[in-house]
Image (cartoon, coloured by chain):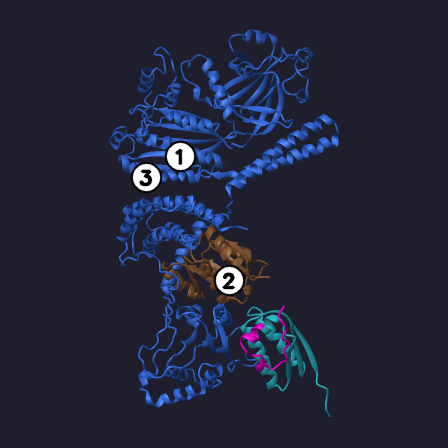
Chain colours: A cyan, B blue, C brown
Amino acid sequence: MAKKPTQRRLELSGEMSISTAGAIRQQLLEALSGAEIVEVDLGRVSECDTTGVQLMLAAKRQAAQAGKTLIFADHSAPVVETLDLLDLFAQLGDPVLIRSQV
Amino acid sequence: MSTMDDALNTFVAEGRELLEQMEESLLQIEQAPDDAGLINAIFRAAHTIKGSAGIFGIDYVVAFTHVAENVLDRVRAGNLTINSDLVALLLAVRDHLGRMLDHVAARSEPDAEIHSVSERLVEQLRNWLAAPPESAPRHEGEAAGSEVEIESRSDDYGQDAGTELWHISARFNIGILRIGLDPIAIIRYLGTFGKIERIVTLTASVPTLEAIDPEGCYLGFEFAYRSDADKATIENAFEYVAEDARIRILPPHSKLSEYKSLIDEVSGDDLRLGDILVHCGTLTQAELEEALVLQATIPVEATVPPLGEVLVQQKLVQPEVVDAALDKQKQLREKHSGEAALIRVNAEKLDQHINLIGELIIASAGINLAAARSGQPELQEAASLLNRLVEDIRDSALQLRMVQIGATFNKFQRVVRDVSKEIGKDIRLEIAGAETELDKTVVERIGDPLTHLVRNSMDHGIESAELRRARGKPGHGTLRLNAYHDSGSIVIEVADDGGGLPRDKILAKAIERGLVKPEQVLSDSEIHALIFEPGFSTAEQVNNLSGRGVGMDVVRRNIVALRGSIEIDSSEGVGTTIRIRLPLTLAIIDGFLVGVGDSSFVVPLEMVVECVELSAAEIEAAQGRNQLDLRGEVLPFIRLRDLFEIPQAAAPEIGNAQEILTQGVDDELAFLLEPVRRENVVVVDYAGRRAGLVVDMLQGEYQTVIRPLGAVFNGLQGISGFTILGSGQVALILDVPGLVRRVAAHEGLRKQLSLSEAC
Amino acid sequence: MGKSIMIVDDSASLRQVVGIALKGAGYDVTEACDGKDALGKLDGRKFHLIISDVNMPNMDGITLLKALKQLAAYKFTPVIMLTTEAGEDRKREGQAAGARAWVVKPFQPAQMLAAVSKLILP
């Protein structure tokens, strides 16, 4: 009786900063409420501060609690940099392409 | 891109401006010692100068201003009431700062004199400080306010950890992000002078997406940090968050007991802190175990010593303090709400701009001339449009150079105050027309003459209080500075309600000095004008300037050099008004172009009243008298041809200039055929005096840029400058005030008077 | 592109020097001469950090700070207040308004750069 899980892709762009945190939380909530598997594309995120990191953690937590899957993908350089600084890759658990430094 | 050198120039310019404002406020504050706006303005001047001087590392300015600022801060806080002694001291401080700025401007080191005056003034300022004196601002690293310090245990108890790493433990209040502080920025900052060896980000407090406050802070950090920096530097990284965070900093090789108490303090987190310390590489597993054993053996008091702990002096805000400050600010805002947004422009750049516009005007005149010659209507139309636009640009550019005279007037508050004290008279200064605008260069050069006039009025115009009362006047004298615009000129008046000029004394002195012959009959105004004659006021009694030995003739010479004039209105026992009339601008004038032989002259248009033509009969009648009858009035005139010794042209050139000859020409062909016989008279008026200038040709209105005469022309009478016409020809600009005076002299009344200062 | 910083101070020379230092570090710098001027220059731009003097004509730094907190776009923007040791009262007032970052005048350009990097991500 396996039903194919609903999938959804969300693309975040611009700053993941305190001034956008409220709106991004809303976007993530909506994406999670409408699908079982959500892929969040971070390729066009220009900046990631503490609120951005926390939203990523909170979204993971939310998904886990609801038995859903939430994957962050295509981390942009600023996101990679911040997660690296705080050593959070392992905790978030998403595959990250580490770009070689230009 | 601006350079530090530019910035230093800006510093000097703004410093001088601030000192002026400071002086102005200081002079007003005696009348209104509680005016928060004034106090704040004075404080701000010192504050800003100190702040900017510091950034340039001009320490002697910083150290000196610092003490003054402290005194002013006490005034501002209401702990000190301002009185005339303090005002006098602060004025001295202000003057001293001015001298310091001179050194900064010259890029020279202050001399011993500066330092000794600084010391003396600092000494005096300290008398106003109740608190023990502080000679200089604290140095960097000693951040004031949120004092941050580490206290480590001084005793030797227990074993040291082997690590060379710092351990930093950081927890934040949930609201910290909302005040603009991001822990990540601080961690990055630490990375600029050290290396985060291992970090554990504590995420257990982060709620679900549904529950999270997106702007709250939930993260905590434990990290091992390698750096050669000293304790103070590392603490300093946290100075801004100190109030909204719990930060523990353990230096390398701290006692195991200190790690132990850290573990105890921050327990309850998701990971056991002991394990984190090991994970970070701060402690080895063995050290951790050793530390944990300590619990049983160390007395309680000793186990929780203040570790490397950031202590923050919690400062509670008292509502009444806030209210009072808000009130102050409100008053200040009201006071300043009228100020417009201004930008500062380098005066040199502005002059360059004006010069270019001058060239543009000349070029445009050339095009106009060529267009008229070409006879092409389209070209003429385009040229006239261009001309109009250039005129507009000229007007707006000149407007840029216009400044209000108020700042200059306000300087006299100080002069009047100081001189009053010095000579023991009670004199008040009234200022009117402060918003009247005039050219910057005029403003810059009017200061000295005005100072002379003001001092003169105070010294000699205003009587002693006793005499004033005897004359039924109020005991205090009044000096009035006034400015207004009057037909293309600005008029500046220095008026006093003093004794007026002693007519007979002046006349007697002038006769004694041989300036006037005893038998000459002079009107009152002519007698008054004698005080401007060279050689008149060198004696001490009537008109010296408080022993300065500078005569009023110098004043007039300065005014005349600005193409201005000066006149006196005085009545004995009532007072004297000295009226200075100046052109609004020095750079460009609207001129009236006239020709004599092959030469061209420009008469400032604002002084031209009309142009009349002399008939042959009138020329005959005027021979030898240099006067003509203009509608029943006697008009003295002067022939430019004679004055400048211009040879009679062999044959009058029927050139382009004559094509635009339009004015004052009637249709009598005879005159066109006999141009040599025809003479035109330009009637000029200067300060109520009229004179005629006899010329060959009237060439119409002409806009022109005044260029100063070079040394070669200095001493050339009747000429104030020259300009280059569109055709490339040079035209001399007539010095109408000088010519009018010369004509007046020819009238015979003042033949004896020297006119050598006409230029 | 570097982050945008606005420096608000009534001293043009101070703005110039801070501007030179910040531009040298790759920031994009805008100057304003007082609080009112600063508010006028916010429109349509995003500043990542505002450096403001406390004592200024027209609108002082504390009032500017309070006004910023009312603007959605600048509610959380970090603000560095410039002060003197003498300004303790104002400092308390500023802290009440949410200011935490203070740089004490006189300061060296390097101190300003350090303060800036403690507050914003590169």
Nearest to the observer: residue B433 or residue B311? B311
Q: Amino acid at mark 1?
A: Leu
Between B8 and B407, the residue placed more toward the observer is B8
Q: How many C-alpha atoms fall within 10 Å of the one at disc 1: few (<14), some, or many (≥20)?
A: many
Image coordinates for residue B663, horizontal then vertical, percent: 63, 20
Q: CA distance from mark 1 to mark 3?
A: 14 Å
Which corner quadrant of the image does residue A95 belong to?
bottom right
Return the residue nearer the eye: B322 or B602: B602
Task: For mark 1, name the chain.
Answer: B
Q: Which residue is mark 1?
A: B481
At mark 3, the secondary structure is helix
| Badge 2 density bin: few <14, some 14–19, many ≥20, Cα 10 Å | many
- Please check the rendered image and state whether residue A5 is part of the magenta-colored stretch, yes or no: no
Q: Is B625 drawn above or below residue B715 in the view shown? A: above
The tag on residue B509 is none
Q: Where does the magenta region start and end?
A: A81-102
Mark 2 and mark 3 residues within 8 Å of each other at the beta carbon: no
Give the Cα distance between marks 2 and 1: 45 Å
> The residue under label 2 is which amino acid type?
Leu
Q: Chain of mark 3?
A: B
- Which chain does tag 2 point to? C
Horizontal and vertical percent position of residue B320: 36, 63
Q: Residue at x 41, y 89 (%)?
A: B289
**Residue assigned mark 3:** B417
Q: Secondary structure at mark 1?
A: strand
Task: Tell me: residue B499, above or below residue C63.
Answer: above
Comes first in the chain, label 1 or label 3: 3
Q: Position of residue B719 (x, y in %)?
A: 52, 22
Disc 3 marks a residue whose amino acid type is: Arg
Of badges 1 and 3, the one in the foreground is 3
**Residue that carries the numbered disc 2 in the rendered image:** C68
